[in-house]
Amino acid sequence: MDLIRILIAILLPPLGVFLQVGFAGAFWLNILLTLLGYIPGIVHAVYIIARR
């Protein structure tokens, strides 16, 4: 299941984080990082998914 979440996180980083943590602070941080740059959003999303 984590592999599917990582693939989703690469395509849409906030969706991958949302599937992992819901509307927690990490989700909002990921939206901000994705708006500032796509790559930081991906890195953060993969980190959140791999951490759990």
Image (tube, rainbow, N blue to C red):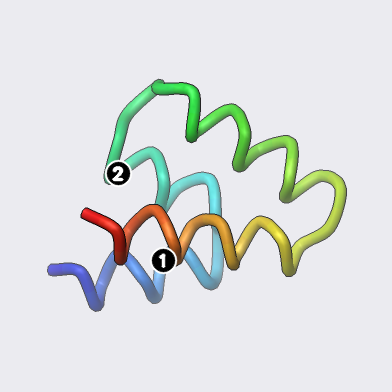
- Badge 1 vs badge 2, beta-carbon distance below 8 Å: yes
Residue 23 vertical position relative to residue 19 in the rendered view, above or below: above
Residue 36 vertical position relative to residue 26 in the rendered view, above or below: below
Image quarter in which the C terminus is found = bottom left
Residue holding disc 1: 8
Q: Residue at x 30, y 44 (%)?
A: 19
Residue holding disc 2: 19
Q: Residue at x 81, y 44 (%)?
A: 35
Mark 1 secondary-structure assignment: helix
Q: Nearer the viewer, residue 44 or 14?
A: 44
10 Å crowding of disc 1: few (<14), some (14-19), many (20+): some
Residue type at the position of mark 1: Ile
Residue 28 x/y as whole percent: 58, 27
Q: Residue at x 55, y 69 (%)?
A: 11
Residue 41 x/y as whole percent: 66, 56
Residue 18 vertical position relative to residue 2 in the rendered view, above or below: above
Q: Residue at x 24, y 77 (%)?
A: 3
Residue 4 x/y as whole percent: 25, 72
Image quarter in which the N terminus is found = bottom left
Q: Earlier in the sequence, mark 1 or mark 2?
A: 1
Q: Examine the image and state in which quarter residue 13 appears.
A: bottom right
Q: Nearer the viewer, residue 49 or 38?
A: 49
Residue type at the position of mark 2: Leu
Mark 2 secondary-structure assignment: helix
Give the side of residue 24 with respect to residue 12, left or right: left
